[in-house]
Amino acid sequence: GGIVGSFFNWQGVFAMLTLLGILILACSFFLRETLPVGKRRTGDFVQTYGGLSRVMGHPRFALSIAVLSSCFISFFAYISSSTFILQNVYGMSSMKFGLCFGFNGTMLAVASYFSKKRKDLARGARNAIVLYLAGAACVALSLWLLLPLPVLLASYIILLLGFGLGMPVLSSLALDGEHENAGSASAWVGAVSFLAGSLVSPVVMLGRPTVSTGLVILLFSALSCLLTQRLYKKYLSQA
């Protein structure tokens, strides 16, 4: 993205996204259903989408979705605002921002890889969200006080390490109790991330973006931490 932005205007960026979308769509035609025929469910439209409301009636799953939603809201606050903050406030070029964003994405991928290496996944997820909150606090203070760029970048890394360590495990734990409604549960887990992104993106740019972004990241990471502690104590500590 940084390379494209360095050589093309915003229309060029959207043209590149369009080409990538077409490529992904073409590749999707070669995907095959992996669920055995004997385990597949059939039914009409009402039965299919009725599962969405049915799984949300399960308290453990509903609480898990609340945790994931809170995490994704604070995560997308970072995604939505980092371009403006790093380029307009801290003066990074689009190329340097692209490299920085790519490095942060690598840290997220590395953390996600190691997230399921622990035997006690529930405790690991709880600890990861505490790290996520610590990173959020560092990011918020860096933005509010306009601390030096290296401090902000280090805070972003802590935030993303916590997110990467926690999200895969929390998603798995959310789906663990919904084997009979796996499709509907997966749909909810996927939908909350996009819904969170669409809701928080305009909010973080209200007023002073450094203030509003820090506030959203800190508040919703704190909420996700509180909800995770409740999820652990009520449903996961005896698992």
Image (tube, helix red, strand yellow):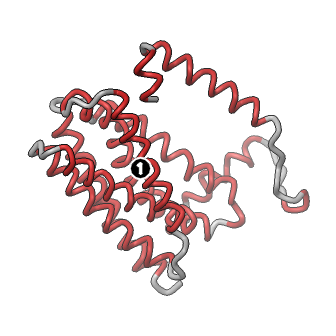
**In the image, what residue occupies the spot 43% across and 15% down?**
10
Establish if 75 lies above or below 112.
above
**In the image, what residue occupies the spot 60% across and 64% down?**
175
Q: Disc 1 residue type?
A: Phe
Establish if 86 lies above or below 224.
above
In front of the other: 40 or 197: 197
Measuring from the top left, give residue 144's x and y in whole percent.
12, 44
**In the image, what residue occupies the spot 90% across and 61% down?**
38
Measuring from the top left, give residue 90's x and y in whole percent.
19, 34
In front of the other: 231 or 20: 20
Establish if 125 lies above or below 38.
below
**In the image, what residue occupies the spot 32% across and 32% down?**
83
**Residue at the farthest bottom position:** 238
Q: Is residue 189 left or right of residue 93?
A: right
Q: Is residue 118 left or right of residue 130?
A: right
**Quarter location, residue 136:** bottom left
- Name the residue beneath numbered marker 1: 72
SS at mark 1 in the image: helix
Q: Is residue 231 left or right of residue 202?
A: right
